[in-house]
Image (cartoon, rainbow, N blue to C red):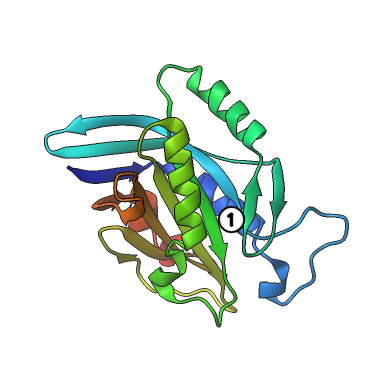
């Protein structure tokens, strides 16, 4: 079956805003403010509805909730707290219209290191972590990755929309968002067949500025 992912406006905004908030100050040419928590990658959970329609498995992501309590985080990695992961899952799944669909995290990059849609490509660590979550939940799960960088000036370039990726701009920030699905039989992460995110695909910097 093909896999279709719909990312709602509110879910997309939660991912983008939390990633920008935690974006490393060193990549903007500034120092991290004193007495603040570590900057870097963010991690969170995706909730919504999963159903089959015709020959497709459809994931409708309506909630993206960033995890505030982590074991550790850097600009390159994040270690989630299993206890707090389960706490979020238990609370949201108490509402019958929501089920855990997967997770998301960011890949912050300096401007020189950002490589377009490749910036949201999964790493081996991402793959192993997603497969472990899928094994624990007993079902295949989504993994959404947001690659992010900061530019010295805002661009008015239109979005780059592909089947599994969307690249766009939000002010001075350039991002690429990619959706994957675990394949526990083959022990790998695979690109979804279609990522639908109207806000990312339909709003350009020329609309925001």
Residue found at the far right of this picture: 35
Vertical comparison of 63 with 99: above or below: below
Left or right, 199 with reference to 42 = left
Task: Describe the element under mark 1 as helix, strand or loop.
Answer: helix
Rendering coords of residue 196 (x, y %):
30, 49
Q: Could you tell me which quadrant the N terminus lies in?
A: top left
Q: Position of residue 82 (x, y in %)?
A: 63, 36
Query: Farthest residue in the bottom direction?
Result: 112
Instruction: State whether residue 172 appears in this view.
Output: no
Residue at the spot 54% in from the left edge and 79% down from the top edge: 113
Report whether 189 appears left or right of 129: left
For image coordinates 36% across by 34% down, the residue present is: 139
Q: Which residue is mark 1?
A: 19
- Within the image, what quadrant is residue 156 found in? bottom left
- Seen from the viewer's position, the closer of residues 77 and 132 is 132
Q: Quadrant of residue 52?
A: top left
In the image, residue 198 lies at what x, y percent? 33, 49
**60 versus 17 height, above or below:** above
Q: In terms of depth relative to the viewer, which is nearer, 17 or 120? A: 120
Name which residue lies at 60% across and 52% down. Answer: 42
Number of marks in picture:
1
Left or right of 47 in this view: 58? left
């Amino acid at each position: 079956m093909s896999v279709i992912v719909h990312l709602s406006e509110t879910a997309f905004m939660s991912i983008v805003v939390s990633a920008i908030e935690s974006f490393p100050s060193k990549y903007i040419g500034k120092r991290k403010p004193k007495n603040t928590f570590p900057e870097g990658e963010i991690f969170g959970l995706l909730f919504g509805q999963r159903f089959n329609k015709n020959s497709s498995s459809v994931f409708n992501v309506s909630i993206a909730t960033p995890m505030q309590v982590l074991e550790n985080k850097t600009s390159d990695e994040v270690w989630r707290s299993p206890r707090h992961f389960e706490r979020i899952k238990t609370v949201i799944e108490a509402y019958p219209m929501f089920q855990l669909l997967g997770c998301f995290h960011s890949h912050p990059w300096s401007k020189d290191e950002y490589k377009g849609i490749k910036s949201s490509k999964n790493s081996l660590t991402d793959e192993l972590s997603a497969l472990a979550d899928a094994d624990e939940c007993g079902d295949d799960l989504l993994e959404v990755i947001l690659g992010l960088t900061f530019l010295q000036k805002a661009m008015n370039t239109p979005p780059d929309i592909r089947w599994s990726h969307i690249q766009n701009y939000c002010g001075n920030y350039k991002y690429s968002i990619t959706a994957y699905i675990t394949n526990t039989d083959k022990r790998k992460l695979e690109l979804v067949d279609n990522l639908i995110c109207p806000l990312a695909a339909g709003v350009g910097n020329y609309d925001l500025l």
